[in-house]
Amino acid sequence: MELKDKLEQLADTLTSAEKACLKLILANAVAESIDDADLSADTIKAKAFRTSVVSISRLQSHKDLIPENGIVFRGYPEFLTNETLTNLQKESKDVRSQAIRFHDHFVVSNAPVAKSFASSPELNNLLSERIGATEPTGKANYIYYDEIGMGIEPHIDNEDFSLNVIMMLNHEWSDQKSALVLFPYDKPPVKMFLQPGELIAFFADSVIHSRERISKGEKVSIVAFGFRPV
Amino acid sequence: MIKSEQKLDTEALNASLPSLTRKLKELQKGLSEEEQAVFSSIINSAALHLESTKAIDAAAEIRYMKPISAVASVTVRNTLLKLPKTLNLNK
């Protein structure tokens, strides 16, 4: 039995809050090591990185539903009309002044248009057709990365966003554009540049992900909808 | 089915730290020498990273806010920063 197995056994004895703190430890350990050159090496640091990444996904009760890369869907859903996209983009702009700074990005929670889209049956069906029964958690957040240096460290989400459905609303840049980055276990990081209206659904409580730092002249706004398997 | 035993707010996270620390100490007792080294690397790396993000957080309203658990409360942060010492793993 390896350390990752022992951590999985430990997880069975933890409360939700203890588990959340353990996930914080593992996610921060990954974030510290992520820029190191050779994480496939046979060193203690590389083993610590791999153990942390795999243990995060193993801490979830729905670990067997998680695809290898963590992604359930990426693309332009048929039910997303131009009108709905425009309404989401407009609301995102309209509520920007109400955003609260958290860590190194800004957030507005549960604005009406976003909340309504989050509970649409079509969006839930998009997920449940692929991984079995799911339900919206009722959480919908506009997120803004619109100052130089903003972004978000490699992290995992909590149970309100076990399945995080992210839609790109606006991405402006001059020289360099930042990516959404996923760090699947035992594979190189995957950089993704979503287009407005493009949507990605992934197991955000299990796959480490980040937003690269915003550069000069760059602005990103997205909306994130929370779902969970049932 | 996801079981939510308790509301995961700042208070719940803070309250869970002593028992989690105890369970991690118990876990350590059953680790081989190499596993101990890997475990130590995880705990120390986490503390190092939290230390390095202090400057970013100075400008933020630090709190446990769903959906993002990249950082939690000040108490959680401080406890994790001290965890290498608490678990006798400080390098």
Image: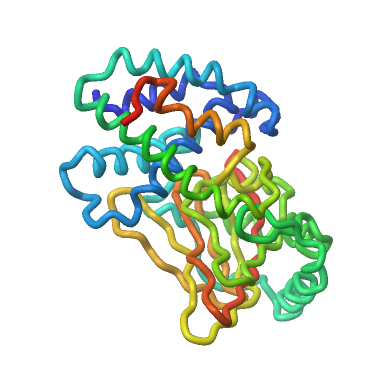
Residue at figure coordinates x 82%, y 72% from the top left: A94
Q: Nearer the viewer, residue B33 or A192?
A: B33
Q: Give left or right: position of A63 versus A134.
A: left
Q: Is residue A30 above or below residue A16?
A: below
Q: Nearer the viewer, residue A218 or A195?
A: A218
Q: State the image quarter where residue A105 is shown.
A: bottom right
Q: Quadrant of the N terminus of chain A?
A: top left
Residue at figure coordinates x 45%, y 16% from the top left: B23
Percent across and percent down for residue A104 are: 60, 58
Q: Is residue B3 above or below residue A167?
A: above
Q: State the image quarter where residue B30 is shown.
A: top left
**Residue A64 in sight:** no
Q: Quadrant of the C terminus of chain A?
A: top right
Residue at figure coordinates x 77%, y 68% from the top left: A96
Q: Give left or right: position of A119 versus A149.
A: right
Q: Extreme left residue here?
A: A42
Q: Is residue A205 above or below residue A150?
A: above
**Residue B34 in sight:** yes
How was the colour assigned to the protein in this rendering? rainbow
Percent across and percent down for residue A120 are: 73, 58
Q: Nearer the viewer, residue B52 or A55?
A: B52
Q: Nearer the viewer, residue B2 or B56?
A: B56
Percent across and percent down for residue A102 are: 67, 53
